[in-house]
Amino acid sequence: FFLRSEVTYLICHKTAHTTERGTLICSLKRIFTVQLTMITSTYTKAFLLLVALSAVITFVVTNKDIKNAWDSSHRQMSVNLGGGNCMWTPPAYKGIEATPFYKTIIAGYPSGDKRLTFVQMEALTGLPAKDEWDFQYLGITNHPFIKANYPHHEGIWGWGDVGDQVVMVVRNIKRAMVEYHDILWDIGYAKTWEEATVLIPNLYAERPPLTDFTAWREERVLDEIKWYGWFIDFYMEGGLMRDIFTNKITTPKHWYMLMMPT
């Protein structure tokens, strides 16, 4: 699994399993798993579009208001420039406050795949996505798509209890580690939301020096491998908690104490 260039998507509806946070967590293996070996970037993009479309179908069918709107008008996902070319059009960032949505958490280990996934979902529906940290620091809004790194330490459960289903993006661990460091380097290894927000324009602008990556790898990679595996455990096993230092299974109370010792 880890030696091939694979992207796995798992989609689930929330179940009656409730965590201490009062939010519903789902066991992803109860629904379905899609797994495909990627050969080229073209195939990767096509598969991401397929997965996004699957989540959107669930989203639209569950949201009657959205389904009725689609039945009565045709959403133009882009401007046709002719000759096989098109121009991307942004989703509607306003006017969605009163619309009831069946909301989707787009969860994954820190890397670039979640971003590509929610961009496809925005294009297919004309509706916006929002980051988990923005929910935490800018307030709860009615965005139907929520990008999340949680429970990885780069994430935060900022969306309260508004999530209804989860799309989990599982990238090949080798590529995920490289892309994770690329993002960290782009934002200057920021430690706070405020620091990271200021440096967002730097994302994906250039590649870091190899020496910077190898220094980070030697210091962090063994721990990150454990956290990568636990990230999958968390969503596959109904919110399973592990001690972030020993990787042993623990209780939510102990885990929250480690994350917020004061």
Image: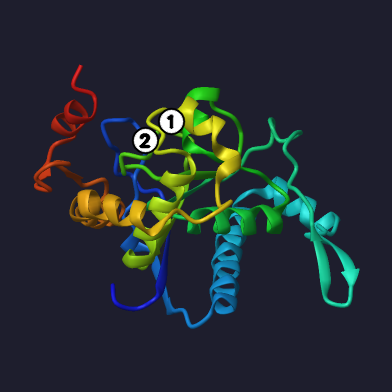
- Would residue 155 appear left or right of 57 to someone viewing this image? left
Q: Is residue 117 above or below residue 256?
A: below
Q: Which residue is mark 2?
A: 23
User: Label 1 is placed on what type of residue?
Assistant: Gly
Tell me where residue 179 appears, x and y as whole percent: 42, 57
**Direction top: furthest residue:** 262
Nearer-the-camera pick, 5 or 97: 5
The quarter of the rendered structure image containing the N terminus is: bottom left
* Count of picture labels: 2
- Would residue 142 appear left or right of 11 to someone viewing this image? right
Q: Is residue 13 above or below residue 20?
A: below
Residue 1 appearing in the image? no
- Circle 2/circle 1 CB separation < 8 Å: yes
Question: Which numbered circle lies on residue 160?
Answer: 1
- Would residue 146 appear left or right of 259 to someone viewing this image? right
User: Label 2 is placed on what type of residue?
Assistant: Thr
Nearer-the-camera pick, 85 or 66: 85
Residue at horizontal 39%, vertical 76%? 5
Tell me where residue 75 appears, x and y as whole percent: 81, 57
Q: Distance between the Cα atoms at labels 2 and 1?
A: 7 Å
Q: Secondary structure at mark 1?
A: loop
Residue 60: name its quadrant: bottom right
Q: Secondary structure at mark 2?
A: loop
Tell me where residue 167 appears, x and y as whole percent: 46, 56
Nearer-the-camera pick, 227 or 250: 227
Residue at horizontal 17%, vertical 41%? 244
